[in-house]
Image (spheres, rainbow, N blue to C red):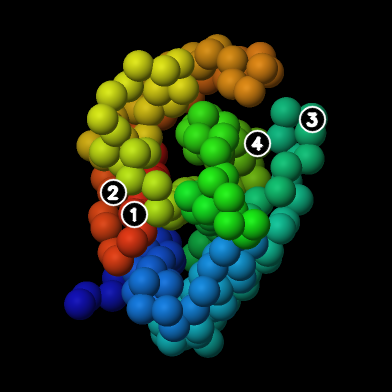
Amino acid sequence: MDIPINIRERVSWAIEFAWRITLHKICNDEIQVNKEASLQLHYSSILKDILGLIKFSHQEKFSLQLESTAKVLERPFIIDILLCYSNSEVSEKHAIELKFYRTLAASGKNRGANDIFMYAVYYDLYITEQYIKFRQADLTTCLILTDYENFVNPKRKTSKNWTYDISHDFKVSPNRFTTPIGGKSVDFSLDLGYHFIWTKQGNFWSTLLRPG
């Protein structure tokens, strides 16, 4: 396992590696996650530990900010995890957004709102693009976890929520999205492309999204 020397590439590597470790711990009941907030806390703790291990020079600095406020489009948005890093040559920020959907809510009842979650994934991608446009971040990563297989391997795609397709191997092209969700109007555009590649571990499916 080669660890990149370039600090920017090393940070991206650490984000992915921490995600894999988090998933293994979840699937083996080492840690329990019921909500997005608990996933964020466990993941950020693991990522912080890894960053400490891959600090190769006293000139390098890494810091994590949870629930950091970023002003874009004249509105405040909350970045789930903002990873700031620097050395003698660069000083950058990598924004990380997480999305988590469990079939059963904490009450034990079916969660529902599948369409809202699918839309929220796309809207997160849109917001991360704005982070870069408005210089709130230099790079972005979206991490998604679910136990609902129909997101990944749907039997059919007949409902309007599949405008926001997140199924396995689906490629999102730059486009404008206006299909209303949950009775609310929608209007935003993605300027970049994304590729949904899901992997299964235990009862969960996960994917990591970056522009490209």
Residue under numbered circle 4: 134
The one nearer the camera, 73 or 106, is 106
Q: Which amino acid does the dot numbered 4 rest on?
A: Phe
Which of the two labelled residues, at mark 1 and mark 4, occupies the earlier sequence position? 4
Residue 132 visible here: no
Q: CA distance from mark 1 to mark 2?
A: 6 Å
In the rendered view, does 150 fall on the left or right side of 77? Answer: left
Q: Dot 3 corresponds to which residue?
A: 74
Foreground residue, 91 or 3? 3
Q: Amino acid at mark 1?
A: Trp
Amino acid type, callout 3: Glu
Question: For mark 2, what is the residue?
Answer: 198
Residue 59 on image: x %, y %: 53, 81
Residue 90 drawn above or below residue 136: below
Q: Give the mark toward the camera: 1 or 2.
A: 1
Earlier in the chain: of badge 4 and badge 3, it is: 3
Whether residues under marks 1 and 2 lie with C-beta atoms below 8 angstroms apart, the answer is: yes
Q: Residue at x 44, y 83 (%)?
A: 30
* Residue 56 appearing in the image: yes
Q: Secondary structure at mark 1?
A: strand
Label 2 SS: loop
Callout in the foreground (1, 4): 1
